[in-house]
Image: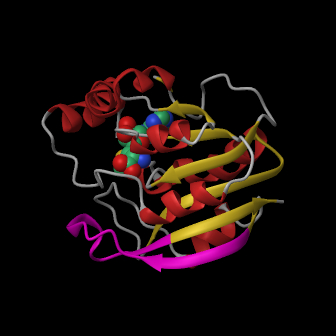
Amino acid sequence: MKPREWSDRYRSHNTKWDLGQSPEQLVSYIVELAERKKVLIPGCGRGYEIKDFHEASHEVTAIDFSEGAIEASRQVIGDLADKIICDDFFKTPLKEDSFDICYERNFFCAISMDRWKDYGPRIASLLSEAGILIGIFQYGKHEDDGPPFPMTLEDRERYIEPYFLLLHDEFTHSGLSLYNDHAEHWQVWQKR
Ligand SMILES: C[S@@+](CC[C@H](N)C(=O)[O-])C[C@H]1O[C@@H](n2cnc3c(N)ncnc32)[C@H](O)[C@@H]1O
């Protein structure tokens, strides 16, 4: 979907993916972080997580290419929406090897399947050597009428595992009907 189509959805409040808060697993994860981290959030949407990381003193850079998402974000996190870069995550200039954590929720399933090959290399290149990818991922059979585009285990093997090692995998359910036919997973991946 193009940025304008995402913006239309935010402006008409047609945002069935929106949880209205950070996932509980992320809240617990942030509590456990001992040091200040540099955090990258691609496809941040309304960006509840920007606030949670920021309030725990972490340095956040978020990216979303939809102006409507950023307007919507301003309504829930105020001036922290200034942390969002309005650009395509795959093209915007960002310093390589500079982030400790990449957090994403339902970004991989929001990009078209022909973009999946770019996901692992892009995130791995931006993370430091000990970098971690965390977030909520959607699994299920391929759907033509997405987003969301859930992935299969074969997709994960092909697009994510060459770049990241799975450290933690937990089944979860957001309660959002959009994802009723998917398996939602909270996962923690270590950069290879
Ligand atoms: C399904 S929404 C998820 C938003 C948010 N992470 C959440 O959990 O509510 C996907 C978001 O990714 C953004 N997005 C999709 N493709 C993008 C791209 N190539 N670069 C930057 N943002 C993108 C959309 O504008 C949208 O806000």
Q: Percent position (x, y) of residue 80?
A: 43, 26
Q: Percent position (x, y) of residue 130?
A: 84, 52
Look at 24% across and 64% down and name the residue there.
178
Residue nearer the viewer, 12 or 28: 28
Residue 146 vertical placement versus 46 (above, below): below
Residue furthest out toward the left: 12
Residue nearer the viewer, 16 or 120: 16
Look at 43% across and 64% down and name the residue there.
24
Residue 113 vertical placement versus 155 (above, below): above
Look at 61% across and 69% down and name the residue there.
156
Q: Quadrant of residue 72?
A: top left
Q: Percent position (x, y) of residue 52?
A: 48, 44
Q: Quadrant of residue 59?
A: top right
Q: How many marks?
A: 0
Q: Is residue 43 visible to the viewer in this orientation of the structure?
A: no
Is residue 89 within the magenta segment? no
Q: Is residue 148 visible to the viewer in this orientation of the structure?
A: yes
The segment highlighted magenta reads 166-185
Residue 1 vertical placement versus 87 (above, below): below
